[in-house]
Each structure stands twice: as structure tokens, then as C-alpha cells.
Image (spheres, helix red, strand yellow):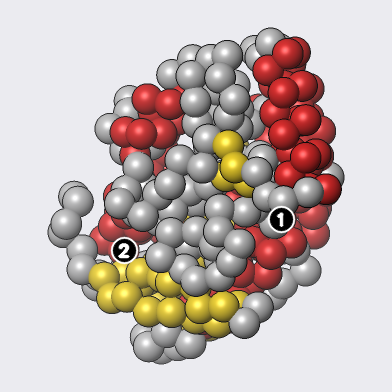
């Protein structure tokens, strides 16, 4: 399907910075009302950029009749802002909410039917962004990271303690001194944010031209206090949570707990974190479930 759906480029302001986005126009009127088509706000995970695997998801949803606004967080990809390659959970959530405001202004889009779509780290952001909102019509949370402490405990099962201590020390030095960069993905035993066997190859297989394999080492400290799953109970819209049961990066038990709190529809896949991405075995089922879920909840009566 890649290349089948055209998109326009645009920017929107967030925190004094211009964030860059792609706008895919939905095909047909199957999900349209007099107010317009529902519009999906789509964001990537840790250190990700929209040109690194998001387009096939966006194209599939646009082909089903939804507009899609896929964007880069400030400091990443084609968006402005500095420092570069630095993750701020609060800043990313602000960017996501600014993208929601921009999506509501798109021509032909229904501002009262926003769909929030997030994967991995953004899979948690969408729960926080949707909480207490009446203009959110549906939420899709794919292999979400919803609890930083749970993720840290989960990582202990598959990482050497020495490697985790080294990355933590680098994060502390970055936080108290000048910023220190480390790879987003690296081989097992090397310094990096994601160093599990196969992660480097999986991420490089998705990487687009704007993606950089570096991130501020303080990201681990940011994750420690990150618990968007606690907001799931405040999500009023129908929610789909897609869990990779063998996920070594985002603990599936934490995702299931948040899904239960949010009264979500849950889909399980017998695979690891990256196996729902384009080119992998479970990508097509994951996309099919998203399209079916959104069509069921957004089709006009």
C-alpha cells in the first residue's frame, strides 16, 4: 500500500517551536458526517520520527476513510526546537495536545471526532492526552509503555545490571552537567537506550532519513516518573490496546492493567515489541484490528 495515499506537509506551533507533520486525507465518505471525517493524531515512540515506519499505518487508516496527522516531536526529525534528541515527557505531551488542536483545524476534518494513535512511548501519551476529553472519539494504543517503573523492573530480566548502571550513570551526568548523548539502539553490552538482542537491526530496518541514532542519556531518568497508565481510567472514548505478549521493551502486564482500567478492547499478539511494524509478521493483523475497531466505532449510524 506504500505510496498509494498522498500527503501534504504542514507545521503547527507548540511551545514556541514549529512541529512538522504529514496530513493524509481520508479516502471516501464511509466515516464522514456533515461535520467532516474523523482525524487521527499519530506519533512515534522513543526517539522515533514519523518517517521511520509510521507511513504504512497512516496510509491504511486513510484508505479506510480517516484523515491522519502524523507529526514529529520538537527536537526530533523535521521539527524545530533545541536541544535536539532530548526526550521530555511533559514536552512531548504538550506537542501531542498541540497536534490535536492542529488536527481539529484541518479542512474536511471533524474537530469533535479526534482519534489518538500512539505506539510504544506514545502509546502511553495517548492515554494521558485523551483523559477527561469529550472531543476524542477513539484511542489506539499499540504496544504501549505505560509505566516507567514497571519498564525498569521488566528490563532487569533481560539486561545485565552493569549495562543498566552504566546508562543510569550517563543519564545522571547528562542531567547535572552538559547534555550527554548515547545511541537510541545498540548491540547487547553496548551503551544505549535499547540494547536487547535484535533491537538494533529492527530499528535500523525502520529508520527514515531524518532519524538519528542518538538520544540524551537523561531519558532513563525521565522514564522513571512516567506513568500515563494511571490516566486510562479517565479516558471516556472507546480504546483499543494492542499488546505484544512477548514484549521485552514495554511490559505487557502493565499495558493490560491500564487497558482494564480504561475498559479497553484488547488484542494480543504472540510476538515482541517490534514485530507489529511494517515488514514483520504481525503488522497486517495489527492494522486490520485498528481499521475494524475504528470503523465499528466511527461509522455514522
| Left or right: 266, with 289 as reference point | right
What SS does tag 1 mark? helix
In front here: 161 or 42?
Answer: 161
Q: Is residue 59 visible?
A: yes
In front here: 180 or 19?
Answer: 180
Q: Residues within 10 Å of mark 1 (few under 14, many from 20)?
A: some
In front here: 98 or 301?
Answer: 98
The mark lying in front, picked from 2 and 1, is 1
Whole-percent x and y of residue 165?
77, 21
Marker count (numbered): 2
Residue occupying image coordinates x 40% and y 56%: 50
In this picture, is 68 found above or below 106? above
State the image quarter where residue 78 is shown: bottom left
State the image quarter where residue 38 is shown: bottom left
Residue occupying image coordinates x 42% and y 84%: 106
Q: Residue furthest front?
A: 178
Q: Earlier in the sequence, mark 2 or mark 1?
A: 2
Q: Are marks 2 and 1 in contact (CB under 8 Å)?
A: no
Residue occupying image coordinates x 83% and y 48%: 176
| Left or right: 214, with 212 as reference point | right
Q: Which mark is residue 62?
A: 2
- Structural distance between the alpha carbons of marks 2 and 1: 28 Å
In this picture, is 220 found above or below 196? below
In front here: 52 or 297?
Answer: 52
For label 1, the residue is 89
Q: Is residue 54 visible?
A: no
In this picture, is 214 found above or below 273? below
| Left or right: 15, with 298 as reference point | right
Amino acid at each position: 500500500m506504500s505510496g498509494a495515499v498522498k500527503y501534504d506537509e504542514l507545521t503547527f506551533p507548540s511551545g514556541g517551536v514549529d512541529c512538522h507533520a504529514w496530513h493524509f486525507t481520508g479516502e471516501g465518505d464511509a466515516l464522514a458526517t456533515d461535520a467532516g471525517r474523523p482525524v487521527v493524531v499519530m506519533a512515534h515512540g522513543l526517539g522515533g520520527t514519523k518517517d521511520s515506519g509510521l507511513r504504512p499505518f497512516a496510509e491504511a487508516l486513510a484508505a479506510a476513510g480517516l484523515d491522519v496527522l502524523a507529526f514529529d516531536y520538537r527536537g526530533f526529525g523535521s521539527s524545530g526546537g533545541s536541544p535536539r534528541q532530548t526526550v521530555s515527557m511533559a514536552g512531548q505531551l504538550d506537542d501531542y495536545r498541540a497536534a490535536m488542536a492542529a488536527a481539529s483545524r484541518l479542512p474536511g476534518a471533524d474537530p469533535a471526532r479526534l482519534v489518538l494513535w500512539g505506539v510504544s512511548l506514545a502509546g502511553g501519551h495517548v492515554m494521558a492526552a485523551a483523559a477527561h476529553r469529550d472531543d476524542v472519539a477513539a484511542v489506539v494504543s499499540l504496544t504501549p509503555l505505560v509505566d516507567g517503573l514497571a519498564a525498569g523492573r521488566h528490563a532487569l530480566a533481560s539486561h545485565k545490571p552493569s549495562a543498566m548502571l552504566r546508562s543510569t550513570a550517563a543519564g545522571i551526568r547528562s542531567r547535572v552537567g552538559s547534555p550527554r548523548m548515547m545511541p537510541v539502539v545498540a548491540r547487547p553490552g553496548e551503551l544505549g537506550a535499547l540494547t536487547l538482542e535484535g533491537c538494533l537491526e529492527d530499528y535500523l530496518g525502520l529508520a527514515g532519513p531524518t532519524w538519528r541514532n542518538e538520544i540524551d542519556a537523561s531519558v532513563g531518568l525521565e522514564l522513571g516518573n512516567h506513568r500515563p497508565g494511571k490516566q486510562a481510567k479517565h479516558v471516556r472514548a472507546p480504546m483499543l490496546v494492542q499488546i505484544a505478549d512477548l514484549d521485552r521493551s514495554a511490559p505487557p502486564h502493565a499495558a493490560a492493567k491500564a487497558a482494564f482500567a480504561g475498559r479497553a478492547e484488547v488484542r494480543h499478539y504472540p510476538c515482541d515489541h517490534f514485530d507489529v511494524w511494517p515488514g514483520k509478521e504481525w503488522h497486517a493483523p495489527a492494522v486490520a484490528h485498528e481499521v475494524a475497531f475504528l470503523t465499528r466505532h466511527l461509522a455514522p449510524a
